[in-house]
Image (cartoon, coloured by chain):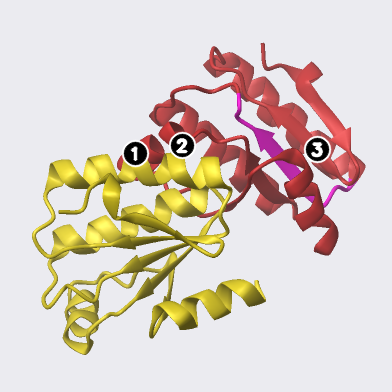
Chain colours: A red, B yellow
């Protein structure tokens, strides 16, 4: 379940985990909660952990792109971490290159990049 | 033939050579193999050698763009090396500016850029 509870503050970033059974309703709640937390806590970054996703489709791709778009409009950089190789291949085959996101191998890599600014 | 055998580890990058007779099936195998190698070997870069290509079309342009897209999603930088002048002209005429790739004159130039980070 990917509701409000799954947003965690880590250093100066918000960590969000996407589960593979996330629904439309949960995503809308997540978007609302995340946008408010970005504004309230004045973070530099949003880290979207997708290591739970073994496969991906256009719905999930769009979810990631929208979270990144919202974060960018609120002046936070989005990092996607934990992407599996097959997920990267599928996203590109679907034409979803996620241009507004940065990617990092792991949470610690993303935090290191955020620290460097 | 552009199968799994043509991916080589050079310093901290994976070197992939694209042949001019590459087929759709080979590209799918290459994408799968490359994405797994990027994740397994934790490389910083992917170097796509296209010096074997004397001409280029939208298929090959798309192949390069997709390899670069997959690499970026897996946190590796893509360098295209060995591009002939006529190939550069054709790619631009086709509207394929390859925004997600960097270019370098040769393998050693690409490795030098990757070392600088």
In the picture of the structure, the residue carrying the numbered disc 2 is A85
Q: Is residue B8 left or right of residue A65?
A: left
Residue at mark 1: chain: B
Upstream in the sequence, badge 2 or badge 3?
Answer: 3
Residue occupying the point 75% across, 55% down: A75
Secondary structure beneath dot 2 equals helix
Residue occupying the point 57% across, 16% down: A22
Look at the numbered discs 1 and 2 and tell me whether their residues touch, using CB distance below 8 Å.
yes
Check if mark 2 and mark 3 are on a common chain.
Answer: yes
Mark 3 burial class by Cα count in 10 Å: few <14, some 14-19, many 20+: many
Q: Depth check: give the residue in front, A68 or B117.
A: B117
Residue at mark 3: chain: A
Q: Residue B54, percent across and down?
A: 12, 78
- Distance between the Cα atoms at labels 1 and 2? 7 Å
Q: Residue A19, percent across and down?
A: 60, 18
In the picture of the structure, the residue carrying the numbered disc 1 is B32
Residue range highlighted in magenta: A42-51
Q: Residue furthest bottom?
A: B85
Check if mark 3 and mark 1 are on a common chain.
Answer: no
């Amino acid at each position: 379940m990917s509701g409000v509870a799954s947003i965690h503050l880590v250093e100066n970033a918000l960590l969000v985990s996407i589960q593979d059974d996330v629904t439309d309703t949960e995503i809308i709640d997540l978007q609302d909660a995340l946008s408010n937390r970005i504004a309230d806590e004045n973070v530099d970054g949003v880290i979207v952990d997708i290591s739970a996703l073994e496969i991906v489709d256009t719905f999930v791709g769009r979810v990631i792109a929208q979270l990144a778009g919202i974060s960018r409009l609120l002046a936070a950089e989005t990092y996607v971490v934990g992407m599996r190789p097959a997920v990267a291949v599928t996203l590109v085959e679907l034409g979803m290159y996620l241009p507004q996101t940065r990617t990092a191998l792991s949470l610690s890599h993303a935090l290191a990049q955020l620290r460097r600014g």
